[in-house]
Amino acid sequence: MATLPRRLKAVAAFVPPAGCLADIGTGHALLPLYLVENGTVTRAIAVEKEAGPASLARSAVAARGLADRIEIRIGDGLSPLRPKEAEIIVIAGLGGEKITAILAADIEIARTAHRLILQPMNRAAPLRRWLVENGWQIEAENLVAERQKLYPVIAATPGTSERMDWLEEELGPCLLASQHPLLEELIKRLTLRYEKAFAGLSKAPHAGTAARRKELARRLAELRALLQKRTPLL
């Protein structure tokens, strides 16, 4: 059976039993191979944008004798898919803004999937915001540490949900609600990022950045208060 890195194992854990899964930006087709071989999905569509990577994926699938169950398609984003063709759509290993752009470009195809499983490498907040604003609800999340980085995994299904506040967008509503074991580390890293942004604006203050500095200061105060709540008194 194909082996997966920790990040993709977390993605695979969110895949329910299904007839067809589409993996967008499949690489060497590791995820489709794993899910077909272990019986989670009956068949898969592995999509790559360029012919070269698609050829590598096709070779990997053929080597495992699964060419009849994993189809390699070449195309941009969701465009190689037909509506209702894939019950599960996975987009992993891309930036949050790129994932958002892929979904927005073919939103009608995306809306026919039963579940989206998304693993942004960065910029998860705008992706979460876009999902909620465009008819998805975030039903599950995980956070994975790999090579000193933290990667969120987001499972979304069609439905309506309340607008998130900025903390939920940045940290993840499900991660906050479940008090994920890596949440504290995520908060610390986000705090550091905001501190650097605030320091950069403070070095050359002018009227045009006053509102941004004020907003950053407010967010930093909320993050520090959140960390303080999580730190037991000695």
Image (cartoon, helix red, strand yellow):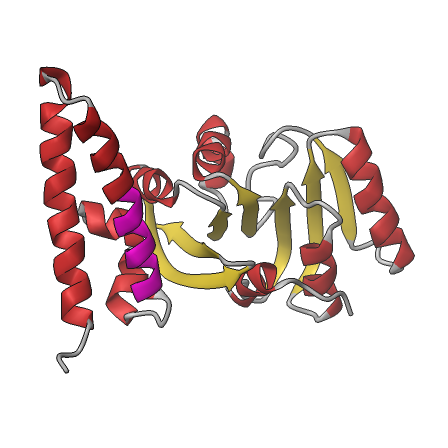
Residue 14 in picture, x, y percent from top left: 50, 64
- Name the foreground residue: 60 vs 106: 60
- Say which quadrant the C terminus sits in: bottom left
Q: Nearer the viewer, residue 85 or 104?
A: 104
For this view, does 56 lie left or right of residue 150? right
Residue situated in front as seen by the camera: 56 or 78: 56
Query: Is 17 positioned to the left or the right of 226 in the image?
Result: right
Relative to 6, is 122 above or below? above
**Left or right: residue 220 compared with residue 64:** left
Total count of labels: 0
Residue 159 visible from this viewpoint = no
Residue under the point 20% across and 45% down: 166
Screen quadrant of the N terminus: bottom right
Q: Residue at x 43, y 55 (%)?
A: 152
The image quarter containing residue 41 is: bottom right
Q: Residue at x 42, y 63 (%)?
A: 142
Task: Name the dominant secondary structure of the magenta segment.
Answer: helix
| Whole-percent x, y for residue 129 in the image | 29, 41
Task: Note whether 52 is above or below 88 in the view shown.
Answer: above
Can residue 226 be seen in the rendering of this structure? yes
Residue furthest toward the bottom?
234
Magenta residues, as a range? 184-194
Seen at 38% across and 62% down, the residue is 140
Magenta stretch containing residue 189, yes or no?
Answer: yes
Q: Position of residue 217 (x, y in %)?
A: 12, 41
133 in relation to 168, above or below? above
